[in-house]
Image: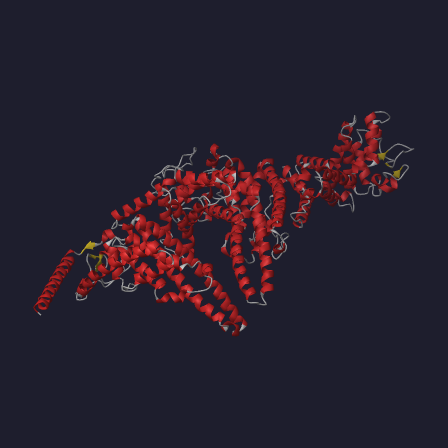
Amino acid sequence: MSKKLQDNPFAALFCSVNDAEEFSKRQQQQDDHFNSDTIKDLHRRSSNGRGLSTTDFLEDLLLVTTRPGPYSSPRVLLNDSENLTTDTIQLLLFDRLLLENPNSHVVGLGREGREEAGRVEVVVYLSEVYDRCWAARDTPLSHVAKQVQAAVITNLATALEQPELYRGQYPDRQLCQILLKELGQKSAVEELAYELIKHLDEQGTTPPPLFDQLIDDVTKQLDQSSLMAVDYHLVDIIEFYASSPYLANILVRTPEKVNQDRTGRAYQNTPLGSLLSISCLTKHLGASYEFFEKPSSQPGQVHKDTENTIWRAQNNINVRVYKIFYMLLKVSAEAKAGLLTWVESCLAANSGRAGLWHVQGGLQGVTYVSDGFMINLGAVMLQLAQPFTQDLKTAKILKVDPTYCAAPRMSNNNGVPGAYTGDLGKQTTLVPHPENSTRSHSKEYSFISACFFLTHRALHLGIQVVQQKLHKLSQELGRMQHEFQDASAQGSPATEMMRSHMESRTTSLLSLKAAIFEPNMVESLLQFLAASAEWLVQMALCPPNQLSPPTALQEVKVPLPEDTDVHIFLQCIPEFLVETLTETISSVRRYSAPLLSSTGGILILPHLMSFIVVFMGSPKRMNNPHLRAHLAECLETLLPESGSSSGGLLAGCREHLFTKHPASPQLVTALIHVFVSIEMTGQSVSFEEKFNYRRPMYEVMKYLWEMPKHRKRFTELAEESLANMESAKPPLFLRFVNLLINDAIFLLDEGLSYMSQLRESQKERDSGEWLNLPTTQRAERESSFQHMSLLARFHNMLGAHTIQTLIRLTKEIPQMFTHATLVDRMAAMLNYFLSTLVGPKQRNLKVRDMEKYEFRPAETVSDICTIYTHLYKSAEFCLAVSADGRSYTPQLFSQAHDVLCRIGRGTLAVELQLISDKVLVAGRTHAEEEDIAADAPEEFLDPIMSHLMTDPVILPSSRLTCDRHTIARHLLSDQTDPFNRQPLNMEEVRPNTELKERIMAWLKEQRALRARRAEAQEEMKDSN
């Protein structure tokens, strides 16, 4: 099949390739002037070499004569001109063009060819002469035809430069119409255009305005094209411009409107922009989608077929646009610089697409280019980047200069050659650079560096933005579906309107999904992101004193290099590179997971693992804790999928990442570090956002825990923490466990609260109370109920994750949870939730469809009791359980025992009885100690918790005294003095030895006094 037919998506409508090609030939025959009898006769007479002199040949080409008749075919008679010879071609052709009414000079018999001979329009006539010369290119007199062609070009250039010679003719318009209709369609016209611009270039003239007008017409027509109805002839014209050094710069001019109002939308109305805008997505605000109409009425296979059709058509147009970009890069140095400047300026003018308000929706369609435009620009840039990203073994990716974004843009007065940086220097970097400091940069940059960063920026403003829109829309549809089901169940009249809105939004979702998951583009994208991940790792592994980029790949080895100093490279690299990487991997996993299971997908996984481990646990390599938390979500993507249909090979490859990858020993530490970092951001982070970050972390921890070498690392970190509980900086694993307890308390408490509220709302709705409310108020109640349902499900689900993590950790390392710093909080948490679930309050939690809200109270009771069994061997833990005056009662464990027996957990119920007995014994001891402490002097009591201090310490800045364990717990989440908010760590506190001795002496005295009293009471009892 010909190239043009391959590019045409409608070729698939024919029964066979032959049918499509035959149809194409018939169309060509209808439009082709070469089939005129004049040209046929010219071929016949010239080929046999008999009876055709040079003069005859010239007359056949020019359709003029200077000889007396008779005439066998129509000719224009030039009476007063010299004889027609090769020497007089220029003169006679010029005389012919100056005739105001050539029809009046036509001689000869017959009507055939009379119209061509008497053609009034000078440019049309010259074009037809050139056609006839081109048709005679293989005849014995072809050298004469070439002379005529040269004369045509000279006269055509004259007509364009001096149009006043031909009154009322408008030669530029005539040529523009010819080129618009036939350039790219007819080889003769293409050669004519090529020779013309060659002539103009040699004369040193700038391109005539007609070439601007022609490309404007092409742009306007392409703007009306849809994905399935692209006029590839127009693409051919743009391709012709790109192939010409003389015309190429016309394609890469910055739109005037951008300079006027500083909006990026104008780029969509440029020649390149008109091509990039062709997509299955809408070009303009408020326009309707072309595909997936009424999606609910179509089976899934129809949507899949539509998607495949879209992908074929989109790939066809993107291949052609890539060819145009490539030609512009190669045709001349000026065109190359122009294209890179065009891309740079386009991205800078559309940088607002990355804003949150744009993702949420608004007037972005008026201000910025369309989603389809930016997706396609990213797809084309990915193809340009393939030579240095496709094969990582060649290390070509290391030719990317990490200081690129710090360089002043080339167009500035002090600009650096090759630095098409746009607004890249203003973007947030992986590690902040000191304010008012100047970052070092190279003296010039290669195309590889420019292409790498411009591609990333295009992906960030295009594919990533649409991925976010897709995710938001998917969540919105999920909520709408729940609301629709509830409304349908109640017979609400709003159901039809809701159904229509859901249809519209589903069309949008399917279109967005088709736009960003075209297989060829995604394969290139994954390759590019793998190369980017490897490049980032290599930059992070450079020693701080290395000021030039590495030239050879180095393997990741653990332990990783100490990151005490920040490398200058990381202060130059924008963090949106990582945002694009993480968003894309997560999006592919959600909506097109098989792509990660493909051969290309498997190949990127090791590079992704290296990147995650190197950056996730180090704020010195990536400062933004939110971004490092997103890496945990990417890590979840690498987990083997249970029950995967791809078989054991893929699962084996993924398991290998967690067991054999060189960086895998660092996984646990990095994961726990980022878990803790989310809490210590110093920024306002909503609970929902924080727990959304931690959800994938729980999944990864669960997987790692099943692997002996990773479980051992958890244990090692716990032992390190226990050995350094009072270090200046709280140990990593201690902070992790403390936050885990915080999470469990918050999530379970919120989840139970929402269940209680849902119960009340269900009772009100079932009683018919809501039906008596005004429509607006009833709708508000329904909306509030749906929102509450989602929150309940969210907190219950994450609460279960947290409890499961605590079960694993308390079984393997119980000593961490029974340490004096944590034991009271751990005991209080377990007591509170157990009492809520098995005590009198449990009746407030009973709702319909508990599974819908991920609420499984029986399982939660069982899990909490399991944690008790892991910790009860510690006397300190049993004492803390009994000392909890808020939730513990002697009946607590018997109530839990009954629940466990009812749900079939008899073995656990027996073990719980043993715990109950041990706690009761500890409780009696505690009661005696509390009785003593009740009489303690005020100075012996902890000022924060009001209990008797056992190890008083002095805080250096406030000079106040509190118990060591109290201040240690406080510093886990807030490293300041609680009395004056000054910075504080455990190494700064000083033991209050004198006070401790007095407390110990007082306790000894009180215990002795009580012992004597008890002894006296026993004696009295015996005597009685």
As rendered, which of 364 and 443 lies closer to the eye?
Answer: 364
Question: From this viewpoint, which residue is outermost toward the left?
Answer: 1023
Question: From this viewpoint, which residue is outermost toward the bottom?
Answer: 772
As rendered, which of 1021 and 325 lies closer to the eye?
Answer: 1021
Horizontal and vertical percent position of residue 450: 51, 40
Image coloring type: secondary structure
As rendered, which of 904 and 304 lies closer to the eye?
Answer: 904
In the depicted structure, whether residue 82 falls above or below residue 314: above
Q: Is residue 282 visible?
A: yes
Horizontal and vertical percent position of residue 13: 70, 44
Question: From this viewpoint, which residue is outermost toward the right?
Answer: 70
Q: Quadrant of the N terminus?
A: top right
**Is 693 positioned to the left or the right of 207 in the image?**
left
Counting labels gives: 0
Q: Is residue 454 visible?
A: no
**Is 957 positioned to the left or the right of 271 in the image?**
left
**Is 151 positioned to the left or the right of 343 in the image?**
right
As rendered, which of 140 and 1006 lies closer to the eye?
Answer: 1006
Horizontal and vertical percent position of residue 454: 52, 43
Q: Quadrant of the C terminus?
A: bottom left
For residue 485, which quarter of the picture?
bottom right
Horizontal and vertical percent position of residue 186: 73, 38
